[in-house]
Image: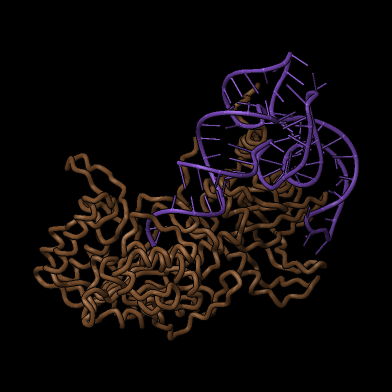
Chain colours: A brown, B purple
RNA sequence: GGGCCGGUAGCUCAGUGGUAGAGCAUCUGACUUUUAAUCAGGUGGUCGCGGGUUCGAUCCCCGCCCGGCUCACCA
């Protein structure tokens, strides 16, 4: 009987499934409980010497068979659970003829449970001596090669489940990202912040300058946008009396994909009533090293050739002083003479265009000249008004807003400001954005009447903060691509 | 979107204008502490897709698809 549609390996394994069922064995078991994690077994017997055994402790372990070495009447298999491996040894004398024969029939990829005691082989590897075993899940597909593993990026991202099996360091890194999020959540809760959830489907996307995804609600017959930021809803909650809140969740921006951009990404935003951006800076410079300590065990990270110390305090540098130092022009000079600003930037190998304005020139100077030079953690503070339609003005200068960005390893880790709570000023800023939109700026901020109505009821003074979790994870875990800290990064659909 | 690089067996990769290769995996046999186990033998391929040139294309040309890097935009 020819079934050319089914690959050979799968046909063989499907036949094994049939044979197992014929002998009364279910190849997809219901449970194997209790069990001990492989890593725990290894940790408990780290001191066991070669050729010694420890028969007093019996273990039930389970995992995926990632390799096997058959020796006639004996057999070694290596099990993996998550990112821990443990070798299992079995022989025909202990298992008996029937059970041993079935064991030699298992394939790399199968998931099995084993019961036995540990010993350490002559070559020094901690090993479970199997006294009995059971098939838990039959695998129908071959695993990638044991030596070179799975390298192909496309397969790794499309079939992350295989990547996680074949590359335990990937599994470890993605798990560490999870630990980062939970550590952040705990850190904030311990300081009185309450976690909230605000709409992802929004009638008007706001809180950031970006192009949104559009979707449609059938029953309401209305277009909705996937949020580009939760900011305006969190501020509505501040009006409502929540005075320390945060949200950790996905934002969606309909823009390019790169080493540092994924269309959906995770953001932590927090709002803290009755403080300004100075308190937020203190929070950030204390929280980041605390999170690093939990996730990596230290407050130092290495990015490229640079050792970075995250411990506080972090220096504060104004945009104005950084511009003077790196571009040779003050903010006021750049505002007054955009021609000179363009020349100065062009001289530093920054692409400038005719349509560049004061605001975009400052933005380019920060991104291409100033940030890349800030390796150790630094707060860049006090931005020009034009770049920040939701931030409050400085008491000393109406053209400056109280805003900061933490820069680590040359990269922006977040964005924060003293929140604008003057509804009249906010309306003016929205109207300015509306003019930009008419002039063709697709990313200009929309005018949100309900948000203004909320501000008119009165929002307490507050500091706000957004931190990109993906980029923070990259920095702490030394990932070069955002795809390495996202379980299922966005790819073009498979065809 | 532009530029550059890539797609060959399940995996990692060689390769040539004249019937397609290796290692590992898989299959058969041997082997009771191996560990990239070992030894002997075998199976396995629309060479990303579609056109063109040619007696003949996996190879050369054109178009497309998918991925990577990079530039632009963005966090």
Is residue A272 shown above or below A114? Answer: below
Q: Is residue A357 above or below residue A271?
A: above
Give the residue displayed 54% in from the left and 74% down from the top.
Answer: A296
Quarter of the image with the N terminus of chain A in it: top right
- The residue most toward the bottom is A313
In terms of depth relative to the viewer, which is nearer, B66 or B27?
B66
Residue A287 picture location, percent across and down: 41, 78
Examine the rendering and report whether any part of residue A354 can be seen: yes
In this view, the residue in front, A485 or A161, is: A485
| Towards the viewer: A24 or A153 | A153
Answer with the quarter of the image where residue A14 lies.
top right
Q: Is residue B29 left or right of residue A217?
A: right
Residue A228 located left or right of residue A2: left
Q: Residue at x 49, y 62 (%)?
A: A349
Give x and y (percent) for residue A59: 63, 65
Asked if residue B12 is positioned above or below residue A386 in the image, the reply reads: above
Horizontal side of residue B51 vs B25, given as left or right: left
Q: How many marks?
A: 0
- For this rendering, which residue is in front, A45 or A204? A204
Q: Residue at x 19, y 78 (%)?
A: A461
Relative side of A479 to A380, left or right: right
Residue A10 point in image, percent of width and height: 63, 35
Q: How far across and down, in percent of the image, does residue A330 sit?
A: 35, 76
Quarter of the figure with residue A43 = bottom right
Asked if residue A194 can be seen in this view, the reply is no
Q: Quadrant of residue A129?
A: bottom right
């Amino acid at each position: 009987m020819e079934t050319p549609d089914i690959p050979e390996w799968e046909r063989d394994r499907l036949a094994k499934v049939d044979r197992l069922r014929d002998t009364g064995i279910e190849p997809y078991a219901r449970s194997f409980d209790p069990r001990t994690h492989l890593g725990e077994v290894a940790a408990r017997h780290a001191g066991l010497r070669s050729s010694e055994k420890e028969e007093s402790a019996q273990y039930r372990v389970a995992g995926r068979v990632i390799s096997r070495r058959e020796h006639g009447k004996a057999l070694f298999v290596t099990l993996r659970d998550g990112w821990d491996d443990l070798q299992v040894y079995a022989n025909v004398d202990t298992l008996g003829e029937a059970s041993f024969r079935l064991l030699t029939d298992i394939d790399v990829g199968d998931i099995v449970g084993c019961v036995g005691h540990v010993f350490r082989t002559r070559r020094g590897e901690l090993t479970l001596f199997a006294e009995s075993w059971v098939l838990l899940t039959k695998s129908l597909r071959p695993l990638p090669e044991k030596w070179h593993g799975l390298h192909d990026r496309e397969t790794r991202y499309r079939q992350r489940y295989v990547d996680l099996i074949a590359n335990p360091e990937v599994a470890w890194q993605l798990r560490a990202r999870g630990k980062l999020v939970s550590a952040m959540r705990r850190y904030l809760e311990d300081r009185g912040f309450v976690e909230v959830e605000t709409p992802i489907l929004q009638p008007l996307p706001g809180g950031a300058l970006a192009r949104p995804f559009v979707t449609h609600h059938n029953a309401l017959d209305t277009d909705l946008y996937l949020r580009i930021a939760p900011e305006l809803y969190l501020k509505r909650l501040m009006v409502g009396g929540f005075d320390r809140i945060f949200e950790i969740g996905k934002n969606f921006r309909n823009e390019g994909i790169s080493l540092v951009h994924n269309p959906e990404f995770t953001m932590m935003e927090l709002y803290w009533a009755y403080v300004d951006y100075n308190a937020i800076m203190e929070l950030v410079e204390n929280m980041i090293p605390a999170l690093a300590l939990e996730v990596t065990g230290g407050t130092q990270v290495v990015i490229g050739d640079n050792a970075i110390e995250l411990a506080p305090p972090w220096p504060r540098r104004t945009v104005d002083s950084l511009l003077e130092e790196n571009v040779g022009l003050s903010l006021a000079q750049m505002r007054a003479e955009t021609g000179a600003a363009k020349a100065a930037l062009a001289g530093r190998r920054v692409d400038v265009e005719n349509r560049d304005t004061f605001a975009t020139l400052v933005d380019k100077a920060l991104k291409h000249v100033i940030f890349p030079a800030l390796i150790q953690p630094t707060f860049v503070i006090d931005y020009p008004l034009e770049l920040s339609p939701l931030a409050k003005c400085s008491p000393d200068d109406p053209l400056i807003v109280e805003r900061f960005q933490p820069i680590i390893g040359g990269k922006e880790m977040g964005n924060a400001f003293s929140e604008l709570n003057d509804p009249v000023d906010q309306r003016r800023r929205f109207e300015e954005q509306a003019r930009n939109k008419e002039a063709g700026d697709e990313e200009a901020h929309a005018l949100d009447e309900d948000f203004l109505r909320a501000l008119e009821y009165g929002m307490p003074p507050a500091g706000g903060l957004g931190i990109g979790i993906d980029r923070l994870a990259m920095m702490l875990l030394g990932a070069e691509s955002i795809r390495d800290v996202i379980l299922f990064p966005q790819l073009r659909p498979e065809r």
